[in-house]
Image (spheres, rainbow, N blue to C red):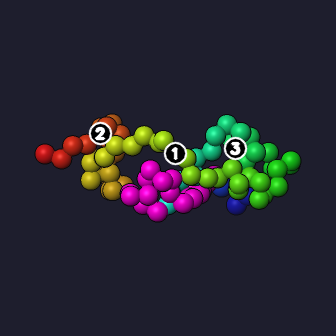
Amino acid sequence: SGEPLHSYTILTVDAAPDLEWLHDRMPAVLDAEGVERWLDTQNTPPRAALAACRPRVGLKWHPVHPRMSSLQFDNPSASKPYTPA
């Protein structure tokens, strides 16, 4: 149709040591320099851009309600910490 297709991809890396108990993979989180390298396709070879994708230590997390597993769960409370009763 000639229309642009807007999409995204989540790149995963090995889990950071402090999150390995939860899962063996985690999303790649780029720091400011990594973002610049990732977006500079003219001057950054693909392998150098991929090198910016590494585990990030010190991320904060909290449990969320089990309903978060459902695509139909759309509620402002979704990002709030959850404590089972």
- According to the picture, the residue beneath numbered tag 2 turns out to be 81
- Name the kind of residue labelled 2 in the image: Pro
- In this view, which residue lies farthest toward the bottom? 24
Q: Nearer the viewer, residue 13 or 71?
A: 13
Dot 2 or dot 1: first in sequence order is 1
**Spatial separation of the CA atoms under disc 1 and disc 3:** 15 Å
Of the two numbered discs 2 and 3 on the same chain, state the one appearing first in sequence. 3
Q: CA distance from mark 2 to mark 3?
A: 30 Å
Identify the secondary structure beneath mark 3: helix
- State the image quarter where residue 48 is shown: bottom right
Q: How many marks?
A: 3
Task: Where is residue 65? Give x, y as percent.
Answer: 27, 48
State the extent of the magenta-drawn residues as a range.
6-24
Q: Which mark is residue 34?
A: 3
Disc 2 from disc 1: Cα separation: 20 Å
Please name the residue shown 34% across and 43% down the image: 62
Question: How many C-alpha atoms fall within 10 Å of the one at disc 3: few (<14), some, or many (≥20)?
Answer: some
Question: What residue is shown with label 1?
Answer: 57
**Mark on residue 42?**
none
Secondary structure, magenta segment, majority class? loop
Q: Position of residue 76 (x, y in %)?
A: 33, 36
Secondary element type, mark 2: loop
Q: Residue pushed farthest right? A: 43
Image coordinates of residue 85 in percent, x first then y, are 13, 45
Instruction: Give coordinates of residue 18: x percent, y percent.
Output: 44, 50
Tag 1 near tag 3, CB within 8 Å? no
Nearer to me, 22 or 64:
22
Q: Residue 32, relative to residue 73: is it above or below?
A: above
Q: Which residue is rendered at x = 56% and y = 52% of the image? A: 55
The answer, for residue 67, to whether it is visible in the render is yes
Q: Nearer the viewer, residue 76 or 41?
A: 41
- Tag nearer the camera, 1 or 3: 1
